[in-house]
Image (spheres, rainbow, N blue to C red):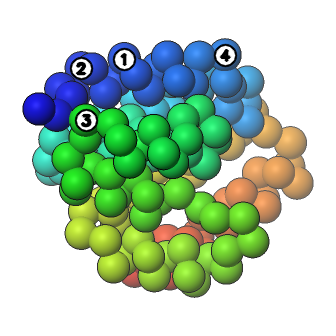
Amino acid sequence: MTLTLSEVESLARAAHEGQTDKAGRPYAEHLEAVADGVRARGGDEHQIAAAWLHDAVEDEAVTEDWLREAALSDRTRNIVLALTKRPGEPPADYAGRILATPGARLVKEADLAHNANPARLAVLDEATRTRLTEKYARMRALLGLE
């Protein structure tokens, strides 16, 4: 039996407890915004669950072994693994993996939309804001989201 969305949300919130985003906000706010964005874009329960967990391995909130053993659907697990950036990985390779994984592009679209939200970016220093805006635009282009 797979975890319910409520259980996945609780696990994600607990795993990221004490973590903050670049603006110093609780990281769970980002996860919730991405999950809401996936839902608003018509994503299914597997994609919404993946949204809650999309940064968990990358941020070392959980291990890849935990993810592989967790009571998640293969679809959710595959999306999370596709969205997990690997050290030194070229952006084009990362985007290619996302595009090759059914359901992952929509989750990444919601992630990028929240990351690039002008209100979130406004609290960052100009150099960081510029760097991140360019990074997000590049990834959107690689994913065909322009």
User: Which residue position is annotated with label 3?
Assistant: 71
Q: Secondary structure at mark 3?
A: loop
Q: Depth-wise, is mark 3 or mark 1 nearer the camera?
A: 3
- Is 144 rendered above or below residue 127? below
* Amino acid type, mark 4: Gly
* Amino acid type, mark 2: Ser
Q: Residue at x 49, y 76 (%)?
A: 95
Residue 126 coordinates in the image, percent (x, y): 85, 49
Total labels: the figure holds: 4
Q: Nearer the viewer, residue 80 or 140?
A: 80
* Amino acid type, mark 3: Ala
Q: Which mark is residue 18?
A: 4
- Is 117 rendered above or below residue 92? above
- Is 97 rendered above or below residue 10? below
Q: Nearer the viewer, residue 146 or 2?
A: 2
Tell me if mark 1 has few (under 14), some (14-19) or many (20+) residues whose alpha carbon lies within 10 angstroms of its own: few
Q: Secondary structure at mark 4?
A: loop
**Would residue 122 be visible to someone looking at this image?**
yes
Q: Residue at x 33, y 79 (%)?
A: 100
Tell me if mark 2 has few (under 14), some (14-19) or many (20+) residues whose alpha carbon lies within 10 angstroms of its own: few
User: Which residue position is annotated with label 2?
Assistant: 6
